[in-house]
Image (cartoon, rainbow, N blue to C red):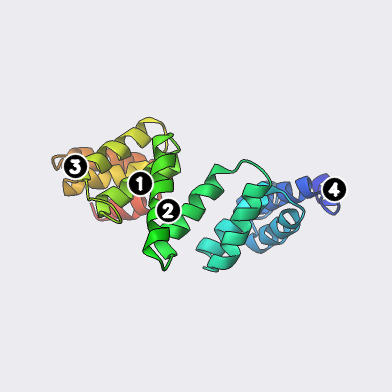
Amino acid sequence: MPEVVIKAEGDATYQFILAEAYEHGVEVKQDFSRAYYWNIKAGNSGIAAAQHQLGLYNLFCTEDLNKSIEWFLAAIDNGDNPESIFYLAYIAVHFADEESIRIEGVNKIKSMAVQGFPLAMLEFANLLKQGQYLSQDNKAAFLLYQDVVNRGYKPGLFELSLCYLDGIGVVKNRKMYLDILMKSANAGDKRAKRQLKYN
């Protein structure tokens, strides 16, 4: 790792590698402030992956939507980044003041879900379940959760388990709920781990 640190001073690619190392604690002690520092350097140098990470940071940590949007747009400008496109649509759906912008966001998420983008499939299933800006359709939500899980997207396991718990689009089935919840917990989902404590 010392070689990466030396190279990171002048090379944006190594700056991003170092940011990832600090974020995940790979060969260095996990340090989110150092990860942020190196992502800023890499992002300012045009590394799309770093810009995407900064978009996520500003969306979920500081809740600075304007900064988040700026970083996601930069990531899109610097490379094909479908996750950044997804998160711009997510921001539109959940934070836009104008209903027309929210509906555009829903349509973009739906389009990405139809194309098989797992994050969009999961979010569109959530929107269907909630009936948010479209007709509520629990059966379609359940089928979409099932599809995204069958494609190997582990974050969908928790939502699928809740369908069996609450009878959302499927007959309630406590055994299926617990089996899928256990798979979700084993895949590292913190929500599933908390839920298991109460079951």
Can I make out residue 115 in this image?
A: yes
Q: Which-is-in-front pick, marks 1 and 3?
A: 1
Q: Residue furthest left?
A: 171
User: Disc 3 to disc 4, how far (Cα)?
Assistant: 53 Å
User: Disc 4 to disc 2, how far (Cα)?
Assistant: 40 Å
Query: Dot 4 corresponds to which residue?
Result: 7
Residue 150 percent across, percent down from the top left: 36, 30
Identify which residue is drawn at 71% across, 55% down: 43
Query: Dot 2 corresponds to which residue?
Result: 105
Query: Dot 3 corresponds to which residue?
Result: 169
Identify which residue is drawn at 63% across, 60% down: 32
Identify which residue is drawn at 76% across, 51% down: 15
User: Disc 1 to disc 3, how far (Cα)?
Assistant: 15 Å
Q: Which-is-in-front pick, marks 3 and 4?
A: 3
Mark 1 falls on what kind of element? helix
Can I make out residue 23 in this image?
A: no
Question: Is residue 62 left or right of 155 when viewed as pictured?
Answer: right
Q: Which-is-in-front pick, marks 3 and 2?
A: 2
Q: Which-is-in-front pick, marks 4 and 2?
A: 2
